[in-house]
Amino acid sequence: MTAPASVRTVAPAASDTALKINHKKRKVDPTYYWMIVPVLVLFAIFSTIPALIGGFFSFTNYAGYGDWKMVGLRNFQNIFSDPEILASYAFTFFFAIVATVVVNVVALLLALGLNSKIKFKTGIRGIYFIPMVLSGLIIAYVFNYLFSNTLPGIAEALGIAPLATSILANEQWAWAAIVFVTVWQAAPGATIIYLAGLQSISEDVYEAASLDGAGPWRQLRSISLPLIAGYVVINTILGFKGYLGTYEVIVALTGGGPGTATQSVAMRIFSGFSGGDYSYQMANAIIFFIITLIISLLQLQILRRREVSL
Amino acid sequence: MSASAISRRSILAAAGIAAAALALPACSNAKAGAVTTIRLQQGKPEVVDYFNGLIKDFEAKNPDIRVVQDFNGGNWVPGLIRDNPADVVTNAYSVTTADFAKKGIFANLADLPAASMADPKALELINSFGQYNGSELSALPFSLAAAGVIYNVDLFAQHNVKVPTTWSEFLAACQTFTAAGITPIYGTFKDSWTLGQPYGYVSGGTVDLADFFSRMPTTAADLKNNPDVSFTKDFKVATEKFLQVLGFMQKDAGSRAYTDGNAAFAKGGSAMYMQGPWALSELTTINPAIQLGTFPLPMSEDPSVTQAQVTLDMTFSIARSTPRMDAAKRFVSYLMEPAVVNAYNNKFSAFSPLKNAEKTTNEQVAGLQPFITDGKYYLNVTNYFPPAITLNNYFQTLALNKNTDAFLTTLDDSWHRVAARNA
């Protein structure tokens, strides 16, 4: 729009020679460079370079200040023999898998319900999307209060002894509270994607199916679900990646406790900044990065096979 | 075009005026004689105003020195990295601060007159973390926050319970309250850090902490020597007694947090509360009528060996690299004057670490005064743990599972792992 004259349209019919001639002259509108270069520079300065510096320090014994020296792979060796770090990996993956499954089941059910012809559809949709606009930290603090005070109070009044103490103080079940709050917060986002998928299915298909005698259950199984399969893949992949980095909900609910029962990898990494354990947790971060990178590549592979794109 | 040129010129002019305006006071200062500006790094937000008052007083007495207070504690380490740390820094002295001292960041203050005025016991605690070059004094103690068992004076009187001076008296007191249907001690271990207080009292009263931690291995080389010291061996009694204390807490202690505890105790929900002096003002805010006292938890049958728990809540250090050493030392010497030290500690329910210090006028902590005066105090055990050990989480596991051996093994393993990382 700014400089249309400089845009050179290469016709599809243009031969190789025409392309070569154009090669030395300006082919692309500079506007695009103006859009991309500042972002690239900012990204490099604030994300890539710090990450590389952190990666370098993972091979040192740097505490965040003072003297340091190279220690080779010692930090990495120590991580693999640190039961707490390994436990945090186990917890994080367990949590990510459970949260992904539950969020998607809940979101799919919500989307199916909200997509049907019910009364006050718009109003109800709005109510279901409120959790999405609240910060995870705020939601988690509210639920912290509910789990610690309200729920035990109700349980005690009803005489249900096992629930009379907070679930957050229970080493075996604290994770369930974290999953619950995560689902409460994350389900609306996934629901929107499913709703978009359901609305993209033409009414004609359902009409034709009902003419052929398909009931609602059959329509769901044979039309809705296969046609939104791509959205399931997207939701699963985006969700899983997000839940691997889970942090604020846990901090606000249990702080990694009770004991060390709910410490996520991200929490362990962050603890390195305050603990003089900078280089050690940097090594942890590098390992976590490589693991998530591998998972992401695998997921991309699945996406391509499914022929959907993000 | 011309419009933009004019505006550019006017901006330059404005900048010039501003620069001149900034330069003027600098000129007048230079005429009045060289003024040295030093920076004080002070990280306690609640005493910023108080320190501004001290600085004003100091500057009035020392017109050739100007002091700037930097109350963002997060500026200290970046200052070190830029090789421009604050000249004077306040710290709650713990293993983290000692790490700076060991790296030679702080100047030697042993030759300051204030060093000879400080209680030798307080200096011993500072030095127990290790001294740079083997003999240097890296910090001067300014304020001791003493902690003990906070008790409800009226409830004690109502049930004819005297302040216990032995372990069995303490147990008897707890049983009296239990029999009367009153929670003896209010527990808040949903906030895992609050467990550091009771564990501190119990372990400080049964183990010589400074000695124990000076023998613990801190580097990979120490580990190779296979030292004959471990939590499993030395902390077993303390940990068992800790669980005994926890047994006197209310049933839902696991789902109660610090603020819940303050509210409950202030309203008479329990007879005792194991918190530091920081909780006192919160308690009186919730219930202005409450009568509070503090006593050190007796851990044996011999009252004469009972000690109080302290933290070196505020110490002063000077950056070794400062080019303004003289001014910094004068400022620290001023802060360490008995009048300044006493006024501060009286105001903030803390204790002066100076020899022959005035006694506290605060009834709520007066019960600890005799122990401080006699130098019978030890540092809270949590001060000896590097932050890389998630000690509070281990406390919480112990409080919930009551497995002494597992707790002590975890501490040993965790301590050894951190030591192995240190070359």
Image: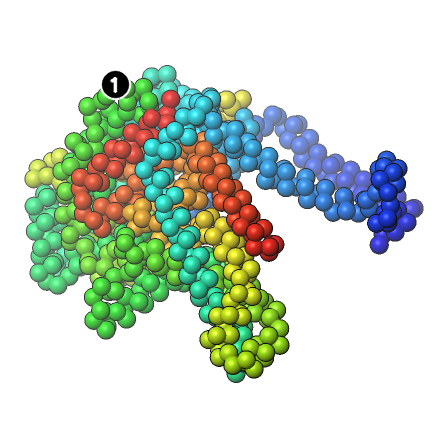
**Nearer the observer, B126 or B204:** B204
Number of numbered callouts drawn: 1
**Nearer the observer, A208 or A131:** A208
At label 1, which amino acid type do we have?
Answer: Asn
Q: Position of residue A67 (x, y in %)?
A: 47, 23
Residue beneath disc 1: B225
Query: Mark 1 falls within which chain?
Result: B
**Nearer the observer, A54 or A21:** A21
Vertical arrangement, residue A188 with respect to residue B258, above or below: below
Q: Residue at x 16, y 31 (%)?
A: B233
- Say which quarter of the image contains residue B379: top left
Q: Residue at x 7, y 39 (%)?
A: B301
Q: Position of residue B385 (x, y in %)?
A: 31, 34
Q: Position of residue A215 (x, y in %)?
A: 48, 79
Q: Describe residue A92's horizontal placement relative to residue B275 as left or right.
A: right
Vertical arrangement, residue B300 with respect to residue A178, above or below: above
Does residue A209 appear in this view? yes
- Say which quarter of the image contains residue B358: top left
**Nearer the observer, B96 or B315:** B96
Q: Describe residue B305's horizontal placement relative to residue B118 as left or right.
A: left
Q: Describe residue A271's horizontal placement relative to residue B218 as left or right.
A: right
Q: Position of residue B412 (x, y in %)?
A: 25, 33
- Say which quarter of the image contains residue B271: bottom left
Q: Residue at x 16, y 56 (%)?
A: B184
Helix, strand or loop at disc 1? loop
Quadrant housing the N terminus of chain A: bottom right
Q: Residue at x 48, y 36 (%)?
A: A286
